Each structure stands twice: as structure tokens, then as C-alpha cells.
Amino acid sequence: MSFDRRFLVSFLLGLGLAVLASRELLSAEDATSELQAYDARITKADRDHWSYQPVRRTEVPEVRNNDWVRTPIDSFVLALLEENGWKPNPPAKPHDLLRRLYLDLVGLPPTIEEQDRFLSDPSPERFDEEAARLFRRPAYGERWARHWLDLVRYAESNGYERDAAKPHVWRYRDYVIDALNKDKPYDRFVLEQLAGDELPDASAETILATGFYRLGSWDDEPADPAQDRHDQLDDIIRTTSQVFLGLSMGCAKCHDHKFDALTMHDYYRLSAIFAPMQRPQSGRSDLDSPAGSPEQLAILAERDRRIEELRIQQRRVRDSFHDEFLASNKSKLPADVQDAFRTAADKRSDAQKKLAADNQAKLDEEIVANLPSRRRSRFDQAEQQIAQLRQQVPDLPRGYFLIEKAEPPPKSFLLLRGRAATPGPEVQSGLPAVLVSAQPAFEKRDTTSGRRLTLARWIASSGHPLTARVIVNRVWQYHFGEGIVRTPSDFGVMGDAPTHPELLDWLAHWFVHDADWSLKDLHQLILRSNTYRMSKSWNDKYGEADPENRRLWRFPYRRLQVEAIRDSMLASSGRLNRKMHGAGVQLDIPRVVIEGHADRDKIWHPSSEEEQSRRTVYAFVKRSLVVPMLEVLDLCDTTRSTARRNITSVAPQALTLFNGDFVNRQASHLAERVAAEVGDDSAAQIEQAWRHALCRRPTDAERATMLEFLEREAERLVGEAAAGEDMTADDARRLALAQLCRVIYNLNEFAYPN
């Protein structure tokens, strides 16, 4: 190739414009050479970025105040504080610390009995015991699953115009809950979601885990199907790289990453890994699939083949009696329907065709019920055989995941400006060059390409520089509000540097080599630290120098997520339904919200109050119609991976918590509960409500204020009763108590725990 032509090709490739440099200017050999040139541009300086370095076991620093150190975490935090001559905040009050622990781990407040048990001996060791007890509760998985669901853009509908429900997608949510409760090692958790169908021990559980790939939005009628296919792959690449690696690979779709050493070649190598996966669908209909190993699926397919043969036999028996039955005049169908069936199918009018289609099942039932004995015997015998086959080979659970068939993978190409219509050089499967010294061999399996398993094993390896750092940082973020790296899904050049880099590496190394990838062990290490047990009180001097609390001189002050707010109301009111798993629950939505929808009679059917009283993680999340309470209190954006939710303070939040039907209903339930528990003593009612909702006793000033409120509110209700309305003093006090409970739910402390 001449110098001028080579210069042109390099220029085009450098800009990420591949098509002209492939089909019209380059041979296949030259195209391969130019793609390899991408890798050659990765320099040692690129590989020297801190997050690409091997994780190492850093030395635990020496500190002056050894009495404060309970775990190595404390040493790292205290060392940085002592460099500035600072001291950590004093410990939180016992009741505040207990509520923090419960809301953090299980998303529910401690009961009064649990409060009394801990407060009788609020020692550090008793706190450790409380934490260990919570890890054994199913509520732990329900609370922490929601964090993961934010990351993987979980919702139960497809988005776009029709926004149809994703069939059986909830099985993925249940998989995450159960995996966390079982403390599935994180490396295995990664393997199952990325390549659960390619594992040697693949099962229904591991295949359901691969639903991870299919959680994004889906257009059931795209204007450009080829481009839509690549957009689906782009969603997978972006989510996978952000969630597991903390890398923004999606930025290299149309050109080399502007900041990180990630090239278009890297992007399309990953695209080639995911390209063999297919979406089960029938036209606009999004389909689910049976979840099982290849052997189980083969057995199920053979069962279904035999059942279909028996169904054909039954249809023949039924059809042989069709005309005779209609001639007998025993049918109870309307006369016009019977006339439609007596008319030959090719001679029916449009009206008759519709009548026949609408009533075919009813006629079939009548024919079977009136079959002569010999024919009925043959029909029933086939039915018995079908029942036996189903008993011998039960149905597999149906799940929502992509499938990969045992056929040659499609070719993958570098795309000009990310457009499917302008393919460039062919690209082979591979990993980001900046993270590997050599590309791995992708070993094909009997039923799949094996590409995802190679990727998954690389990501889940103990030597990967990013995987452990990223998940350890996420767990830290969910406990402390901010990660050690405050850009939790961007460990690249433009991401924040770690505030405590030695601590991050120590934790990542410990997590892999000491905890053996156990998330519960990681939680417990954090919870045992005095760093976690600090108060949230403000220090003017420290706050002026470090307003963002980057040195961790206090425990951060933050609002609860909407799930914890809603679930705490249900728990404190005594109405929480602890039923686990299953299809999503449709919460109440104001009718005015639905009225503007084109399909308002079908789009939403609220579940019963008992079902709606389940934990919020089970709420049905429809992308085009998010439940207002969830939306206004900052539910994540379900169209993309959310590493950290927005925290807003807007008027609709106050209106929702003060005037919303759900909050008022739970306030009434809480009032009924405390009245039943302590009787008519107003002071006792106030204390009981305070302890259920805020997990502490009211101060003398708070008790006096609430007693005065009860009196004034009861008097107001009696005085404002409409003429002829029977408002007794007892009724007024009961309603006033409900209003008091509503006030408690609206206290700042309820949503912003101390």
C-alpha cells in the first residue's frame, strides 16, 4: 500500500471512520493490519492509570489513637484524619445506630422488642450480633437486590410506545434476591449473569441469571431493524462495562474514547462477543423461554413432541364427530353461530368467520362432552397419556433471557459512526487492549459460541484489576452514601480519584483473598468498624475545610431511598406483607394520571391492598407509567444503568408525603395499631407511635407538643363537624391520632435518619 493511501487509511481509522477504509480501499489483510494498529496505539502511560494496576495488599497504617481502631478500615480512615490533626466524630447514639443498621441492611426499622433487646446492652459486641442476625433474614436480599437492580436497569416493561410487559422478567429479580441471601460468591454471581447458559453446570437458576442482558428498553416496531439490533448490543456493552468494570465503553461506539485508552476496535470486539445472542420474539410479541440445561431442554422438547402427537389424535377424534354433532341439534350455541359452523369455511361471510373464530373453543368443549363412548374412550386415553408425560417430565420454569443457538456466530464489523448501514472491517471477539497483554482464545462450545464464558471468566478472575475494586467501592457507597471513588461506574481518566486509595486496594484484596468474594463478609467488616458507627453531627472547622466529607470525619447525612421510606411506613403501621417472590405488584395510581393514556382501561389494574402492602422491591415498574410516589421520591432511571440515584428536594415530595393516599392510609393504620397496643392514654400512644416510626422515645418537649396537638386537633374536628354529622369526642380523638401519625411520617427524621 502506498504512503499516501496508508496515511489516508490511518487518518480515517483514527477518526473512527471505518467504511471507506475497508471495502473500497483495503483488502481483508490490510484491514486486519489496520485494526491491529489500534492496539499498537495503547502506550505504557495508558496502562499506568491507577485503576488498571494490579490490586495489591497495602500495609495497614500506624495511627496514634489505637484505641479507636476496631478494624483495619479504621486505621486507614484515622491515618488521613490525623495527618490534618483531626479527630473522628464521636459514636452515634445507640438508638440512632440501631435504626441506621436496620434501614441499611434490611430497609426496615427495628421493632420495639428489637429496640429493647439492643438498648439493654448497646455494646459494640451486641451491635455485631444484631448485624449477624440481620444477614440471616430474607429482608436483607430484598433490600440489597434493589441496589443491584438499579445498576442493571431493571424494569418490568419494554418502554417505547406500547411499553408491553416483559414476560416472567420478575424471575431475574427473584434470582438476585436469592443469590444475595445465599451469599453467592460475587465471582460466581458475575459468571452466572454473563454466561450462566455456558457454564459446565448450567441449570435453570444460572440461565435465569442471564436475564441481565435483556433488561433494557426494547422497541417492538423499530424503523430500522438492523440499527435497532446494534442499539440493543450497545445497551448490553454499556451496561456490562459500567456495572462490572466501571468503564464507559459506550463512548467508543462512534470514535475512540476521548479520554480513556478504549478504542472503537475494543468496542466492536465486545460487540462480537454478544452478537450470537438472539431475542425470542414473534413479530411485536416479546417471548419468554423455558429455563434449563441443554439436556433438560432436549427432554422437554421430546415430551412436547409426543404430547403434540396425542393432541393431533384428539383433534381427529373430535373432528370426526363435528358434523354429526351439529346435525344432532344438541348444541346450545346461538343459531347464527351454529349456521356459521355448518357453512364450509371457504364460503363463510366475514361475519360468520368472526362468529366461528370467537366460538370455536366453546364448540370444541360441547363436542368432547357429547362424544360417543368409543370415541370418548380414545379421547380420554390420549388425555391420560398426556397427563402421565407431564408428570414424568414437569414443565421447566419460564424466564426472560436471550438465547444462543448452536450455529456459526454472525460476522461482526466496525461501524462507521456506529451505523449498521455502513460496516467497515470485520472484527473478531476480544477484550480491551489496555487491560490485557494478549487476547484470549475463545473456545467454542457444543451449544454456544463460548465467547461470553471467556469474557465472564476474565472479568471474574482474582487478578482482574477492576472487578473487585468496583464492587467493593459500590458496597462502600451504599453504606456511606459516597464511594471511595465517587464516580462508581467510571474508574477511567475522567472519573474521580479514590479519596482513600490504599484503603480501596486493601479492601479489594481482602475481599478476594480473605473473604473469598463473600459480600456478607465485606458488609460485616464495614459494620464492625468505628468508621461506620460515627455520628452525623456537624463540625464547623472540619466542615469549612472539607464540606464534602472526603476525609470521612463524620457519618454522612442522607435521605432514605423511596423503597425504605415506603417499607418503613408499612412496617411501622403493622401492615407489611412479607410475602416474597413472584410477579410484580401494581400499586395504586391516581385515576387522573391514567385518564390521559390512550389505553386507560387496560394499562393498569391495581392489586389488592394486601398485595400492595408487600415490599416495594416487588412493585411493578412500568417505564412509561411510573407510580407517582416512586417517581417523585427519585426512583432510578430504568432506561440505563444507575450507579447513584438523584436526590432532589422539590415541593411534590412534601405534598406526596403529606397528602398522598398511601401515607394517609398508613397513618390511620399506625393510629389503630398504637391504640390497640396501649389503649386511650394519649402520652402512651405518642410514645408508642414514636418508637414504631422513629425507633426512639420522644423528648419531653416533643411529647408536650404532640399532646397539645392532639387536644387542639380533636377540638377542631368536633367544632368543624358538618351540621347533622355525628362526631363524638372519641371519634375526634381517633382521627386526631391518625393526623398525629401523619405528622410523624412527615418529620425530617423519618426520611433523614440521624
Image: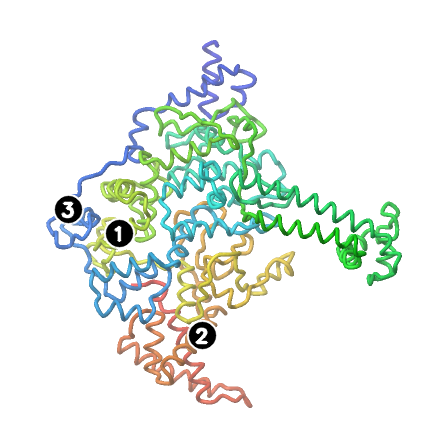
- Viewer-nearest of discs 3 and 2: 2
Label 2 is placed on what type of residue?
Answer: His
Q: Which mark is residue 83?
A: 3
Nearer to us in this view, 257 or 438: 438
Q: Badges 3 and 1: C-beta atoms under 8 Å apart?
A: no
The disc, 3 or 2, on the residue closer to the chain's N-terminal end is 3
Q: Quadrant of residue 669?
A: bottom left
Residue lying furthest top in this view? Answer: 2
* Up-down relation of residue 440 to residue 28 (above or below): below
Residue bearing the label numbered 2: 669
Q: Report crowding for label 3: few under 14, some 14 to 19, many 20 or more residues within 10 A (C-alpha).
A: few
Residue at 70% across, 46% down: 310
Q: Which of pointers 1 and 2 lies earlier in the amino acid sequence?
A: 1
Viewer-closest of 98 and 359:
359
Pointer 1: what residue? 526
Q: Secondary structure at mark 2?
A: helix
Task: Residue 424 in the image: state x and y as whole percent.
Answer: 53, 23
Query: Which quadrant of the figure contains the C terminus?
Result: bottom left
Q: Secondary structure at mark 1?
A: helix
Tag nearer the camera, 3 or 1: 1
Q: How many angstroms separate mark 1 from mark 2 (CA)?
A: 36 Å
